[in-house]
Amino acid sequence: MNIGTLAQLTGTTPDTLRYYEREGLLAPPARGANGYRRYGDTHAARVRFVRSAQALGFSLAEIRWILPRLEAGRVDRREIEQHLQAKIAEIDAHMRQLRALKRELLATFASLGCAPAVAVPIENATAKPSAAARATAAARRGGFVSPASAPAPRRGTASARR
């Protein structure tokens, strides 16, 4: 089958299939005399696996690591269970971070002390982020805590005048 047919069959796009191939998630297909990619049923099965693993929250790096092991028959049920438990633990941690962020947002909302139609000066609109907010923001950025999440410099300091 050609790339368009495989894309339709697996609910992806040709660009996604090319990306999977570049990233080593999909074996390079044979090429026809015209140079077009020719995919088979094994390609479709692999794309379906990648998509279902992504739907379960696994990253492409995690999927790339397990694919050759699966194909070689070197993954048993215990190892699969360990991966699933680790993913569940990640989700639980993320949910805790999101609950903490929600509490902080609700507290910020409750602390608003001006009338709804009144403009808020920037000094009153920004709050010092809590540890929970910084951790959640850092997790979204892949663990990097940016200078923007650090406390703002005090007025009158050299760094405040820049």
Image (spheres, rainbow, N blue to C red):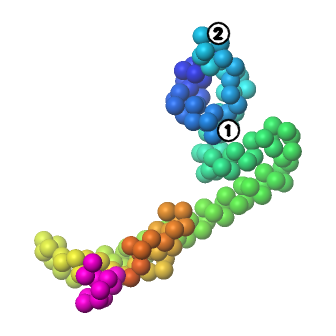
> Where's residue 14, x and y in %?
53, 27
Residue at mark 2: 33
Name the residue nearer the viewer: 162 or 61.
162
> Where's residue 23, x and y in %?
63, 40
Magenta highlight on residue 157? yes
Residue at image x 60%, y 61%?
91
**SS type, badge 1:** loop
- Mark nearest the camera among 2 and 1 is 2
Q: Quadrant of residue 115?
A: bottom left
Q: Amino acid at mark 1?
A: Gly
Residue at mark 1: 24
In this rendering, the answer to whether 143 lies above or below 3 is: below
Name the residue nearer the viewer: 24 or 87.
24
Magenta highlight on residue 125? no
| Whether residue 77 can be seen here | yes
Q: Quadrant of residue 45?
A: top right
Dot 1 crowding, Cα within 10 Å, few <14, some 14–19, many 20+: some
Range drawn in magenta: 152-162
Q: Earlier in the sequence, mark 2 or mark 1?
A: 1
> Where's residue 131, x and y in %?
48, 80
The C terminus: image quadrant: bottom left
Name the residue nearer the viewer: 93 or 106.
93
In this rendering, the answer to whether 120 lies above or below 142 is: below
In this rendering, the answer to whether 99 lies above or below 77 is: below
Left or right: 156 in relation to 66: left
Q: Amino acid at mark 2?
A: Ala
> Where's residue 67, x and y in %?
75, 41
**SS type, badge 2:** loop
Q: Residue furthest top?
A: 33
Residue at image x 59%, y 45%?
55
Q: Quadrant of residue 102?
A: bottom left
